[in-house]
Amino acid sequence: MPFTSPRPMIDTPRNAALSPLFLGLLALLVMLASAHAGPVPARGGLMLRGPVGTAPVEAVRLATDIGVEVSGPTARAVVTQAFRNTTADWVEGTYVYPLPEDAAVDGMKLVVGNRVIVADIRERAAAKRAYEAAKAAGQAAALTEQERPNIFTNAVANIGPGETVLVQITYQQTIPVSGAARTLRLPLVVAPRYTPVPPALGTVALDGTAHDPVPDRARISPPVLDPAVSRPTNPVAVTVRLQAGFAIGAVRSVTHAIHVTVTGPEARTITLAEGVVPADRDLELTWEPAQSRMPGLGLFRETVAGRTYLLAAVNPPALEADAPARPARDVTFVIDNSGSMAGASMRQAKAGLLAGLVRLTPRDRFNIIRFDDTWDALHPASVPATPEALRGAEGFVAALEARGGTEMLAPLRAALADSQPEDGRVRQVVFLTDGAVGDEERIFAAIHAGLGRSRLFMVGIGSAPNGHLMRHAAEIGRGTFTEIRDLAQVGERTRALYEKLEAPAVTDLTATFSVPGVEVTPGALPDLYRGEPLVFAARLPQSGAGSVTVSGRVAGRTWTRTLQLDEAAPGAGISKVWARSRIGETETARITGRLDRDAAETTILALALEHGLTTRLTSLVAIDATPRRAPGMPLVAADLPLNLPAGWDFAEVFGGDHPGAAPDHGAGARVVPINAAGTGIDLPQTGAGILLQLGLGLLIALLGIALSRPGGGRTGVVR
């Protein structure tokens, strides 16, 4: 989000993964992670399936380093993944990993020995063909593909015996603002997704075949470790360099212990207190301005290829709701009690719902819907919020237990169904879930079709909520998205949410430019709630002269503010933020039927290729020109396993205690098959071997790059 005194945006790091300090620490990542993992299992290592007809192969080991540069309203991130082949075979490793749902992924490099290969952006099918051809020819290759806006896959081919290769991904994103707080969220684990099987849809195509609601289920269902028998894997280190653009007050994380170094009144460096942690929960970092130093919001601009791109954030007036004049509300609470919510998530969801019941008055009406792979409602229709009705609701909530699958579509439709559209009440749906489903597009289409006068408020629960589902559902539902990651957050965040529900919204918002030909995204500006700025991006055909006038209605009155475009502060990466937002808007238009598929894909492909972004239709591919694996030498392949998100119950998610069996509800994530003698991946207890081989190989890489690229680039990962 923008501020009154922004710091200059950083340049795209060119050799961020190759600083000497980074190389040494990356070599130590796997060693350090073992210190936090507990005793070594006495039995052998985890074995993963290779291609059909091949013997199982020991899992490729992975360490990840994330460096983030926050500068004013945007963040630039460098994610470096080290793939370590501990076997005597040539290996292809595939890793499914998360990124923020609004990330504009625009770069990838592959580092093999003393060679650095910069990826090209291509149409997805063409990138896949190039990767497969390189893999067959024995060349080192890497392929980055988007499965969902917040789920990506890295495939790395021809990793030699005992070898480590690096894959570095870069992306740009904006920093969300809520009230005074700014939030950076770094997803670290893909939670297992419940994926309904075709019969659950109940529809067939004209040829008599059943539609599959999740046709790519295999691509979003990597193997998952059972924490009862396997240690955490995939160690992660994080460094955030914060240049806020204003005097910083508190910096906090409810998800991880952090170490904060003050580097200036407006600057901080944040690292994990433990140094390295397993990738089993998302990292959330928040910061606020120092007291009495609340920053203003305004315009930022960037010029690319003769076009000016703007990022605008404007605060409408904050009006308190007048209690006597506050409109009566009809609130439907929907709570997910599926197996993935077992444990801490269920407690958080219950506390969040009960906090909403307390704020209802007898003038309000309410109902509660709960769902797993079935659903039911507390009442056939909404009832007045009398003390007796609220006591009954509290008992209903207290009795809920987490179990079964996550069939979200039917309860969502029931919650949006409006039997009294003319009763004059403000109709709101509060939906509490971890969002662990794979059929997001069906959910979005149902919200668009059934929203009517309702407003949908999504509450993300647990250590790794599905941000793509939650945030996009709230956007289509003209509501907001709130995250609750810990019981300690329930009071603060539910209070803020329910205050939004009770306060006047700013509606009928428009942005009018004094110059023609401006492309604004989002095209239809959303309603705003208490503490939220209006944020939009725009592309101007020429220079940034002229003005933009923002107007809307709040509490029955018209509100207007005009900003001069030539007063916009300089920024970087705004063109990619604009393009990523336009792509998301176009995808929504396709899903909701407002744009046919061919037209949508033509627009998306053009934007992605112009701005170099990874999307559903484009991928990044890096290929080393020199063959490495000799003809006839076999190549084995395996998916890297993921940790179960912290706080999840493995048995409740996968149903039963049969390792290697599929979940008994839906066709979700696969359980890792384990060899007869083995349990989990054994993280090394000594760094001698890895330090010698990885350090030597990568220092040679550093020397080679230093000789070929004098001056180097700016480091994106800091220690």
Image (tube, rainbow, N blue to C red):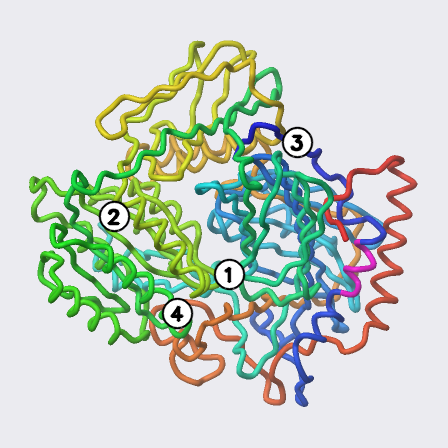
Q: Residues within 10 Å of mark 1 (few under 14, many from 20)?
A: many
Q: CA distance from mark 1 to mark 3?
A: 33 Å
Who comes first in sequence, dot 1 or dot 4? 1
Who comes first in sequence, dot 3 or dot 2? 3
Say which amino acid is labelled 4: Ser
The residue to which callout 4 is attached is 340
Q: Overall secondary structure of the magenta stretch?
A: helix
Which label belongs to residue 7?
A: 3
Residue visible at 33% across and 65% down?
351
Q: Which range of residues does the magenta coloring cover?
A: 22-28
Q: CA distance from mark 2 to mark 4?
A: 23 Å
Who comes first in sequence, dot 3 or dot 4? 3
- Image location (x, y in percent) of residue 310: 52, 23
* Labels 1 and 3 touching (C-beta < 8 A): no
Q: Judge depth for marks 2 and 4 and give the one in front.
A: 4
Say which amino acid is labelled 3: Arg
SS category of the residue bearing label 3: loop
Q: CA distance from mark 1 to mark 4?
A: 13 Å
- Image location (x, y in percent) of residue 581: 46, 34
